[in-house]
């Protein structure tokens, strides 16, 4: 810890990674005797940045009292397995279960994931809107607040230390089923903010149309009802995007089509039902009249009369879908992911996704909306929080310019190392 010219202690904010790339975010906040890390994300596929090694993460987390994760996506939690067992790691309760579910499957096929599974199983959990004294030292306090994102059980963090209030948004949006409370939380809990650390993913995707998640359900329903005949749809999407899966499930319920899934997808849906169904029946996936396990169904009896939607994973289900196409040669593909994986730059493209699309001769129905905040929402968050010291935009492409937003005229945008009011901000 360093000392200012006035003799007072300086709080360090270190952006280890994320200022010039989407994903791989790592933020450190340290006071005199307390240190906290927010997210230890691995690089996304196609990222040109060099990945951190085990030694790098051990160095970053050395002396840390805790690591807090905003959500379970790999670009935020992917390096958790490198953290020494002496450092406590925290995540939301539902997110912890999804993480365990994911790594349990991966570890069965590859022993390299056994460490990740062990770490996921031993993570501690936090509660929304509960204030935690990090390390019990009375120096850094952290309060998680629920946000809507394409990862179930995501949070932003209010960090209070050295009479400063820092808001770290994590990944969030305002157009999902559970995003209505965003402005209320900010109005009640995030006023008088000194420093805002926010994602800026969509700053580099201004031509990408952001629509309400409910429009995805309407689009899926229209496809299932088109021409008044059964439709057989494979939906290429994330297996852990609760809103997207709820949209497809609801479309099936409203058209009498079947919502087809495998046993892994069912295990994820069971977690969603456990934690989210009490808040909205939209997330109750226990409707056995609609949901069908592919391992147990009779294709002719269960699927052919009214059609189906089946969410599928680009990483592991290509061969399965090839076999299914023998039974349903007129099946269609619903593409429900970022288009960059298929038609982006060479660094952005995913061969798994390309192979899937090519299986359907390059033809697909596009039903997607981003899991990230659009520019209007980013500006709104800046206006509400009105950070007195400034805003640090992370989780953004290096070519995007937060400074060009209208809000930047009234808010100090910090992208380089600087010391402000006894706060030492280091951007690596």
Image (cartoon, rainbow, N blue to C red):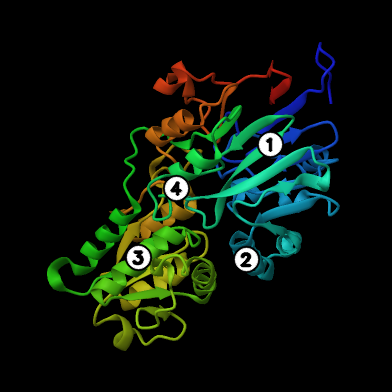
Q: Which residue has dot 4 on it?
A: 371
Gap in angstroms between the C-alphas marked 3 and 2: 22 Å
User: Which one is closest to the eye, mark 3 or mark 2?
Assistant: 2
Q: Which residue has dot 2 on it?
A: 97
In the image, farthest residue toward the left = 227
Image position, residue 150 (x, y; %)? 47, 52
Residue at image coords 34%, 43%: 210
Q: Which one is in front, 211 or 6?
A: 6
What secondary structure is found at the residue carrying circle 1?
strand
User: Which one is closest to the eye, mark 1 or mark 2?
Assistant: 1
Q: In terms of sequence position, does the residue under pointer 2 or pointer 4 come before the other? A: 2
Tell me which corner region of the image, top left, top right, bottom left or bottom right, holds residue 404.
top left
Residue at image coords 47%, 82%: 295
The answer to whether residue 98 of the structure is visible from this angle is yes
Q: Which residue has dot 3 on it?
A: 248
Q: Which residue has dot 1 on it?
A: 160
């Amino acid at each position: 810890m360093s000392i200012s010219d006035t003799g007072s202690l300086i709080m360090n904010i270190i952006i280890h990674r994320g200022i010039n790339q989407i994903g791989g975010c790592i933020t450190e906040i340290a006071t005199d005797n307390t240190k906290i890390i927010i997210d230890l994300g691995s690089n996304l596929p196609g990222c040109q940045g060099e990945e951190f090694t085990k030694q790098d993460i051990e160095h970053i987390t050395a002396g840390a009292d805790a690591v807090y994760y905003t959500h379970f996506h790999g670009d935020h939690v992917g390096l958790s397995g490198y953290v020494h067992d002496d450092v406590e790691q925290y995540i939301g309760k539902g997110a912890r279960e999804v993480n365990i579910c994911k790594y349990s499957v991966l570890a069965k096929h590859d022993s390299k994931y056994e460490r990740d599974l062990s770490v996921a199983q031993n993570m501690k959990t936090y509660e929304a809107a509960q204030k935690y004294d990090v390390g019990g030292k009375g120096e850094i306090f952290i309060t998680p607040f629920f946000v809507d994102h394409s990862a179930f059980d995501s949070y932003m963090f209010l960090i209070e230390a050295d009479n400063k209030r820092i808001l770290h948004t994590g990944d969030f949006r305002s157009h999902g089923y559970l995003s209505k409370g965003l402005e209320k939380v900010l109005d009640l809990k995030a006023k008088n903010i000194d420093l805002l650390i926010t994602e800026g993913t969509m700053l580099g995707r201004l031509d990408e149309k952001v629509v309400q998640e409910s429009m995805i359900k309407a689009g899926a329903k229209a496809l299932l009802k088109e021409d008044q005949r059964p439709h057989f749809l494979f939906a290429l999407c994330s297996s852990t995007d609760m809103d997207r899966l709820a949209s497809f499930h609801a479309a099936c319920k409203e058209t009498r089509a079947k919502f087809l899934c495998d046993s892994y997808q069912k295990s994820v849906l069971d977690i969603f039902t456990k934690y989210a169904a009490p808040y909205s029946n939209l997330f109750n996936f226990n409707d056995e009249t609609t949901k069908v396990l592919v391992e147990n169904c009779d294709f002719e009896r269960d699927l052919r009369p009214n059609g189906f939607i089946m969410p599928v994973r680009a990483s592991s289900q290509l061969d399965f879908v090839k076999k299914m196409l023998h039974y349903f040669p007129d099946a269609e593909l619903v593409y429900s992911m970022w288009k960059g994986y298929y038609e982006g730059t060479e660094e952005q493209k995913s061969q798994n996704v390309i192979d899937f699309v090519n299986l359907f001769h390059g033809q697909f129905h596009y039903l997607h909306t981003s899991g990230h905040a659009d520019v209007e929402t980013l500006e709104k968050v800046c206006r509400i929080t009105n950070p007195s010291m400034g805003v640090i935009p992370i989780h953004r492409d290096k070519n995007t310019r937060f400074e060009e937003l209208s809000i930047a005229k009234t808010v100090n945008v910090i992208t380089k190392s600087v010391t402000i009011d006894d706060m030492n901000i280091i951007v690596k």
